[in-house]
Image (spheres, helix red, strand yellow):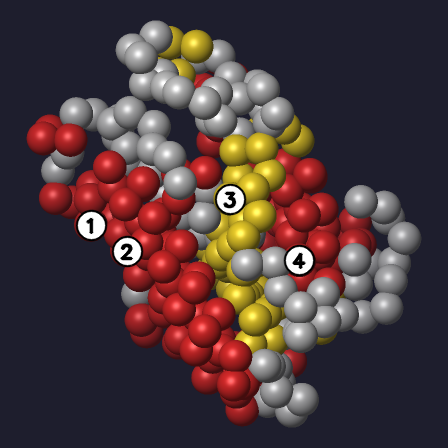
């Protein structure tokens, strides 16, 4: 990414945009010329991230505290975007959580439900609201990019809730791409492997492997993920990256576990 300001691309919403990969994506989009809205559950974190976005890119940025697993909260988020900007050109469904890495039979219902609400229901609710805006606005259409994670393909040990929701995101991506066709709404998915953030520090130190070993794994800078999303977002609506995997080259993903 470069700091060169480019022609305005439109209005983008990044859920989970106050920290980690979401924050990096929001920063990359702002530098590329997008007006960015970030959402998350912690207002103070979002406000700080929005201030950094404005200072770093020179573009407008809005922070809206929202719980993506709550229909009323999601509806309010999109109403505020509509009231402020009158349209939405890009939705990045990035918000998500994990569950404790415990044996499947020991996982609580509450932990399972929290992951499903944030990772899957949240992406659906935001997609639903985005469809309503994108169909009605002029010019109509837009793009949705889902954060699938490489867990959309291959699980880690003791990760049933996260893996199940990310597999489901792949189905949501394909359904969204199909149902959006008549309305100029494109949808794609980025599967990320080991982007370096505060949430992934344990992976760099050592994490359980499929063969039972504990091993440190290579990481990549989260800015590289942002670059990939900026590329996907910048395509004309008659072109789409349906799936893209961005990963550390030497991480133990391709091969036998």
* Disc number lying in front (4 or 2): 4
Image: 35 above or below 194: below
Element under disc 1: helix
Element under disc 2: helix
- Real-space Cα separation, disc 1 to disc 3, in angstroms: 23 Å
Q: Are marks 1 and 2 in contact (CB under 8 Å)?
A: yes
Comes first in the chain, label 4 or label 2: 2
Comes first in the chain, label 3 or label 2: 2
Residue closer to the observer: 144 or 7: 144
For this view, does 178 lie left or right of residue 17?
left
Image: 123 above or below 108: below
Disc 1 marks which residue? 113
Q: Is residue 52 visible?
A: no
Disc 4 marks which residue? 232
Q: Are marks 3 and 2 in contact (CB under 8 Å)?
A: no
Comes first in the chain, label 4 or label 3: 3
């Amino acid at each position: 990414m470069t700091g060169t300001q480019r022609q305005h691309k439109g209005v983008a919403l990044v859920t989970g945009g106050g920290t980690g990969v979401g924050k990096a994506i929001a920063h990359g989009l702002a530098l590329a010329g997008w007006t960015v809205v970030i959402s998350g559950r912690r207002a103070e974190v979002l406000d700080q991230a929005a201030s950094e976005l404005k200072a770093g890119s020179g573009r407008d940025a809005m922070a809206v505290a929202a719980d993506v697993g709550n229909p009323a909260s999601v509806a309010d988020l999109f109403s505020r975007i509509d009231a402020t900007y009158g349209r939405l050109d890009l939705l990045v469904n990035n918000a998500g959580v994990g569950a404790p890495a415990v044996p499947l039979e020991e996982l609580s219902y509450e932990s399972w439900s929290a992951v499903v609400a944030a990772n899957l229901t949240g992406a659906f609710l935001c997609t639903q609201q985005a469809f309503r805006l994108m169909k009605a606005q002029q010019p109509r259409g837009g793009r949705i990019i889902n954060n699938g994670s490489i867990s959309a393909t291959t699980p880690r040990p003791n990760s049933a809730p996260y893996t199940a929701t990310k597999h489901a995101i792949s189905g949501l991506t394909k359904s969204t791409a199909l149902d959006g066709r008549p309305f100029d709404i494109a949808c794609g998915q980025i599967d990320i492997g080991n982007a370096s953030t505060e949430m992934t520090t344990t992976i760099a130190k050592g994490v359980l492997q499929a063969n039972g070993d504990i091993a440190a794994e290579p990481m990549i800078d989260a800015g590289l993920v942002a670059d990939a999303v900026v590329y996907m977002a910048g395509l004309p609506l008659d072109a789409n990256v349906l799936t893209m995997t961005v990963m550390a080259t030497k991480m133990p993903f391709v091969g036998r576990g």
